[in-house]
Amino acid sequence: MTDPVLATYGLTKRFGAVTACDGVNLDLRAGEIHAVIGPNGAGKTTLIQQICGTLSPDAGRIEFLGHDVTATGAQARARAGLARTFQISALAMDDTVLQNATLGALGARGGAFGMLRKALDDNNLRSVAMAALDRVGLADLATMRTAELSHGQRRQLEVAVALALAPRAFVMDEPMAGMGAEGSHRMTAFLDGLRAEAPILLVEHDMDAVFALADRLSVLVYGKIIATGTRDEIRADRAVRKAYLGEDA
Amino acid sequence: MSREGLINAALLAGLVAIPLWAWAGDEPFTITLATRVAILALAGVGLNIALGLGGLVSLGHAAFFGIGGYAMGILASHAQAYDPIMESPILIEGTKLMPVIWIIAIVAAALAAVVIGALSLRTSGVYFIMITLAFGQMFYFFSISWPAYGGEDGLSIYLRNDFPGLNTLDPIQFFAICMVLLLLALWFNARLAQSPFGLALGAARQAPRRVETVGLSPFRLRLVAFVISGAITGLAGALFADLNRFVSPAMFSWQTSGEIIVLIILGGVGRLCGPVAGAALFITLEHFLGELSEFWHIYLGLLLLAVVLFARGGIIGLLAGRAATHD
Ligand SMILES: Nc1ncnc2c1ncn2[C@@H]1O[C@H](COP(=O)(O)OP(=O)(O)OP(=O)(O)O)[C@@H](O)[C@H]1O
Ligand SMILES: [Mg+2]
């Protein structure tokens, strides 16, 4: 078996008395979608923050592409090829859709160089950004102000910015949150194809999407992974049914 | 051209036409007022790059304005006294040449901005406002207690500095110099806003987490913006001192910082010609209300309150509507 693209070992994070992340071992392999599911407050976002470097763990280790990145900052991890989408959209609302995607293209280039040329006159940047928008279906809205996008469209734009980075792995925090059935279906189909480009660590509440997409699943409850396995294994797991899926299934 | 573009063009045309008209009618005082507008607008363009584009509310830009002023004062006073600034290890003499003074003012202000920015950009919000204010005050008290260059009394120079081929003592010619520099700064600001750097800086203002997650450093973007901002305000300081042929600690005072911010808020934060509109209004009010009442600042305060409460985009926002997004 090849080395995982991304892996955590014994990752632990406490907030006072709350252990939001409790000895988490997790890996993401080339070509797969690995879904992390768990009830509200289970620690999914906390896990993502540590993986992406915006929160430092109290204990444990994170490896990305074979390197220990535990002490590396968020920016350096992004430059190394780790792309994140946020649970709550983090976009430049006053800028256009295209400008937001261009920011991703600037990231891929490694810096915001140039003070006198127009960013959008740079054919390279523009084509990377437009290609990303096109793929998520926002090309027609390129010149719209981001604040005017619907909630679902903002989720799509989040993904487009990540695409423009041409990353080695995606880490997505609830990309379908609040999208509606139609949008969810399209996003599901899109992510399905995306895994061939770069593996996806997918945190998601939408169980239809998760069970349609995930090669493997990990179930997080109170900061602990209580099970990891294929869809069938997870469906059959007693502890999971009891702790989590019980309500749903 | 967009509506805002037309308004900007009209505003700048007016700022050129009024002194020309005053020149034809031989009213040098009006030309001087217009020159003040151009210089304060230039200082505002500088701050607007940090404030409008970068979202950095600096209440310490008087530091850069004063550094520019003192750069002029120190260089020119040594030159007029034929007294070198330093003899060993190398000889450094003063100068009366504006372009040299400008470059030194810009470099000195930029260096100060690197230090002030590197320290204060670790903080944000109210802390950032406070720490920049503190730095400004530091320069203020330093200038007061520096007797070699006039201390509290400030420093006068006899003649305005020279610009090759021009008679800088002629008000309209000095106005032309200031106006050209203002136009250059506006041109630069307009380009910067749409450049890759400006795009990333604007994003760092609106969604810093996003900028980090594409691998760019909000801190570095802001620091570069702060330095550019300080440098432009420093240049304005050198011109301001040259206009008055006088520089004093007042240039470093927190009131000066406040005035530069106020004129941007009046004109429109983040709007290209916001500082121009704001400076024009500010000088007009100062001139006319100042004649009516010593307490004209109270009226200014009320106006400021009205703008903050009812016209967030300032004069430009009122006339042109919401800022256009670039295609
Ligand atoms: N900065 C913080 N300070 C204190 N407690 C925190 C902090 N961030 C998260 N927590 C706590 O840690 C636990 C895990 O939160 P987290 O946001 O990671 O959950 P989540 O699984 O992403 O939930 P959701 O499904 O609602 O997004 C919660 O109990 C939360 O209250
Ligand atoms: Mg969450």
Image (tube, coloured by chain):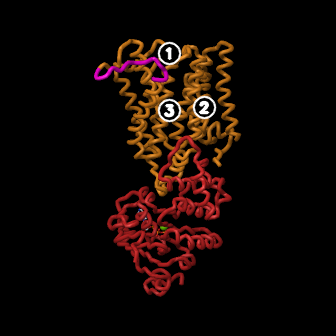
Chain colours: A red, B orange
Instruction: Tell me which corner region of the image, top left, top right, bottom left or bottom right, holds residue A249.
Output: bottom right
Q: Residue B310's spot in the image, x, y percent?
A: 63, 42
**Of the residues shown, which amino acid type is indicated by label 2?**
Val
3D distance between C-alphas at marks 2 and 1: 24 Å
**Of the residues shown, which amino acid type is indicated by label 3?**
Ile
Q: Looking at the picture, does residue A110 appear above or below residue B58?
A: below
Q: Are marks 2 and 1 in contact (CB under 8 Å)?
A: no
Residue highlighted by disc 2: B276
3D distance between C-alphas at marks 2 and 3: 14 Å
Nearer to me, B111 or B301: B111
Residue highlighted by disc 1: B160
Q: Tell whether A144 sits left or right of A58.
A: right
Q: Earlier in the sequence, mark 2 or mark 1?
A: 1
Q: Secondary structure at mark 2?
A: helix
Q: Looking at the picture, does residue A202 appear above or below residue A103?
A: below
Residue highlighted by disc 3: B232
Q: Residue at x 60, y 34 (%)?
A: B303
Region rendered in magenta: B88-100
Q: Is residue B97 magenta?
A: yes
Q: Earlier in the sequence, mark 2 or mark 3?
A: 3
Q: Tell whether B202 sits left or right of B119.
A: right
Is any part of residue B165 visible from this angle?
yes
Q: Is residue A26 magenta?
A: no
Q: Secondary structure at mark 1?
A: loop
